[in-house]
Image (spheres, helix red, strand yellow):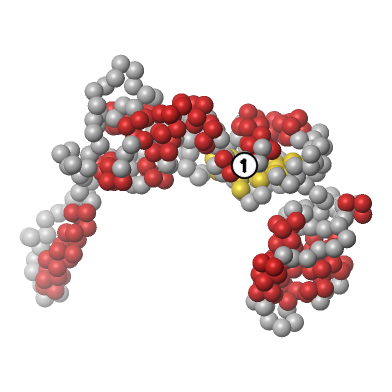
Amino acid sequence: MSVRRLADDNVQPQSFAFNEANKVWAAETINKYPAGRQQSAVIPLLMRAQEQDGWVTRAAIETIADMLEMPYIRVLEVATFYTQFQIKPVGTRAHVQVCGTTPCMLRGSEELMAVCKKKIHPEPLHTNESGTLSWEEVECQGACVNAPMVVIFKDTYEDLTPIQLEYIIDRFEAGKGGDVTPGPQIDRVYSAPAGAPVTLTTDTPAPKFADRAEAPASAAAAPVAAAAPAAQAAEAPAAKAEAKPSLDDPNRPAAVEKPATPDDLKMISGVGPVMETKLHDLGIYTFAQIAKWTEKEIAWVDGYLAFRGRILRDDWIKQADALARGGEEEYVRVFGKKPR
């Protein structure tokens, strides 16, 4: 493990104090532990100090040590041991932590580090000239399926390409990091396979059982037989609730004639070739149609095509609206990445 030392004295502030809100939070956190065990709060307090000031200063270490009645060296040991604590100044708008362990390395993390060297600073743990950005290489961040990835503050940005990382860095540098949606930057839901599902895309028929009417009657079987009608009655509402909506339902979205050049609905994250065909069968050919769906129309499509919440989960309406208004350029502006 590399040696970690505090920042030079010339960048260390003279004092540290939690703001009023954090002061209340710190007192509540310390009170969670029994008398004499308050030292257990050292990591939460150091993290809150870092979140407040951007990094852990010598003054913060000493202040927290006094609050917990700990020797300064004990808190210093904690701050320098755990790499989650930044003990030197980092970027005020973004500190980019690039995962460099095996899965990310195999998937291109070196190219991501090259972007950081070009756009931020040639060396890790150094800020750019304006002090707004910094970067470092870190160990596994737990998103190996979505490699390569980076962490900025508490958010992960996954399935990255160098171009996407450049865009993300530019947004944070402009003070608009909130424009970029955290998580996978390609067509996948969390860590699910990329693209649309290829299995379990249709309703599974109910299993068939042998006719029990011919089973010999017995005293033990009688209560079961008597209970069957009640069980069937209880299951009836559930079966009714799962019934596929009718094509004549007034909540069905309006269909249109197929235009000469339909929109490529597969540009919407969550819509693959199979789903696009199903939407075409319903007369849905354009982004503008999807962007105008009401809650009742969303519920109808979700139920009819057995999407099980995919429309809301993948935010089809917002995606379709962006694509209808400005195509790929507007999509990138809204979501911080290119459509699939």
- In the rendered structure, the answer to whether residue 331 lies left or right of residue 197 reads right
In percent of width and height, residue 270 lies at: 41, 37
To which quarter of the image does residue 29 belong?
bottom right
What number of labels is visible? 1
To which quarter of the image does residue 84 belong?
bottom right
- In the rendered structure, the answer to whether residue 117 lies left or right of residue 15 reads left
- Say which element carries label 1: helix
Picture layout, residue 97 above or below residue 60: above
Q: Residue furthest right?
A: 9
Determine the residue positioned at 30% across, 42% down. 294
Determine the residue positioned at 14% across, 64% down. 233
In percent of width and height, residue 259 lies at: 29, 19
In percent of width and height, residue 20 lies at: 69, 68
Q: Residue furthest front?
A: 20
Determine the residue positioned at 74% across, 68% down. 42
Name the kind of residue labelled 1 in the image: Gly
Picture layout, residue 58 above or below residue 25: above
Residue marked by disc 1? 177
In percent of width and height, residue 314 lies at: 43, 42
Circle 1 Cα neighbour tier, 10 Å, few/some/many (<14 / 14–19 / ≥20): some
Q: Is residue 197 visible?
A: no
Determine the residue positioned at 34% across, 18% down. 261
Q: Is residue 333 visible?
A: yes
Q: Residue furthest top?
A: 260
Picture layout, residue 33 above or below residue 295: below
- In the rendered structure, the answer to whether residue 89 lies left or right of residue 237 reads right
- In the rendered structure, the answer to whether residue 255 lies left or right of residue 125 reads left
